[in-house]
Amino acid sequence: MSHLLPIQKRNAVLNRMAHLLEQERTNIKKSNQEDLENYKGDDLAMGKRLLVDDAKIDGMILSLRQLFAQEDPVGQERFHFVHENGIKITNKTSAFGTILIIYESRPDVTVEAGGIAFKSGNKILLKGGKESLRSNLTIVSLWHQALKDNDIDTNWVEYLNYDRNETQAFLEKPTQKVDLIVPRGGENLIAFVKKHATCPVIVSGRGNNFVYVDKEANLDQALSIIINGKTSNISVCNALDKVLIDTNLPNWEEFAEKLVTELKKFNVILLGDAAFAKATQVDCIENDLIWYEEFLDYKIVIGVTNSNQEAIEKINKYCGGHSASIITKNDAVAQEFMENVDTAAVYQNASTRFTDGGQFGLGGELAISTDKLHQRGPIGLQHLVTNKWYIYGDGQIR
């Protein structure tokens, strides 16, 4: 394990990295252009995640500036106890050591996740997807420049340019100590990492988020929240896939018709359960398994429920543990929904698209965890630490 760098050094590297990104914009976009030209796939979501334009670079710089401004997450005292025999016992946050991040197609992760891991005192191993190789190597060379400019060893940020077999071999028999692995990507990647890893894994990714329109919903809000959740960015894990409508909503069929009309303007493929399909003439789902699916596409499934309890049970059965939103003017109903729906983020009257470290004020995230250990939802700087006990005595024995 590398020695913990003083916070001034860690901050200086982040600051330098932000300057270098600004300075090397053209180079980064040029490398990214090569990646885009080499990408032969037809996955719309993948293409969107792969692109680096000025807005994405602005986002990378902003995330580093937010991280720079945050206090050091390492060495924070969490517990203090003085034993009756005089021993002083303190628990403090400490760095994990080495964190491996495995991700697909998103060059901004190379900056954002790298920055969070580094600021929290960890060495980072970055394993990006082959489709973004040139963009990633360009960004990693800037990390190395920022480290060198501060007289710090470049091995604090390493890029693992491995294919699938090499990655598997590394997971099973790491050539260096790895303390935590964070896979960010599809279900196949996550399953692959969980199967082969020999250290703790934080699962990040799967969405399949729900919006529930309660009988006391403001329908204008419901409409705009659903449209935003589904169409503003289909390639992200906080996008919306499922809608449930309470049949106790006065004239729910009328609202259903309006929703269908609006979604069709965005060329969204609509499927409904039997009751919704009958009311709106959209295609009916073939079976209930589709309720488990995350689409990452212009596609949505809409169904009805007869009670709040039924909505809660359905969401808990099918969702990915990520985000769920209730649209209602009744705060007590919202509170009950939010306490009983088992997702990392629960909303009242807002779009699921906010489940994001930057939006939550964390300065970006290393991952959005749908696991329950040791942190749920966006994992920011202050969550990327473990802890350690410090005991001070003067000769006590038990």
Image (cartoon, rainbow, N blue to C red):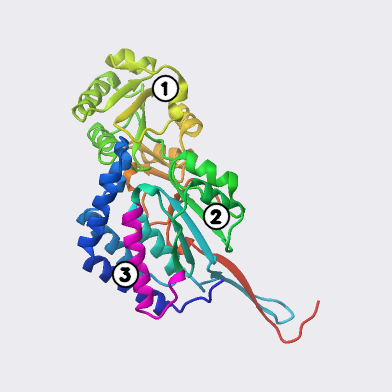
Res. 374 mark:
2
Q: Say which element carries label 3.
A: helix
* Residue type, mark 2 in image: His
Comes first in the chain, label 1 or label 3: 3
Relative horizontal placement of residue 72, taking residue 386 as reference (left or right): left
Residue furthest bottom as drawn: 394
Say which quadrant the C terminus sits in: bottom right
Which residue: 58% across, 54% down? Answer: 200
Q: Position of residue 179 (x, y in %)?
A: 57, 61
Task: Reply above or below: 199 against 332.
Answer: below
Answer whether residue 144 is magenta in the image: yes
Residue 335 visible in this rendered orientation of the protein: yes
Specify start and end residues of the magenta stretch as a single range. Answer: 133-155
Instruction: Name the residue tied to disc 3.
Output: 17
What element does badge 2 sit on? loop
Q: Residue at x 38, y 22 (%)?
A: 304
Q: Main structural element of the magenta stretch: helix, strand or loop?
A: helix
Q: Give the residue type at disc 3.
A: Met
Q: How far is the residue under mark 3 from the one under mark 2?
A: 29 Å
- Residue 309 magenta: no
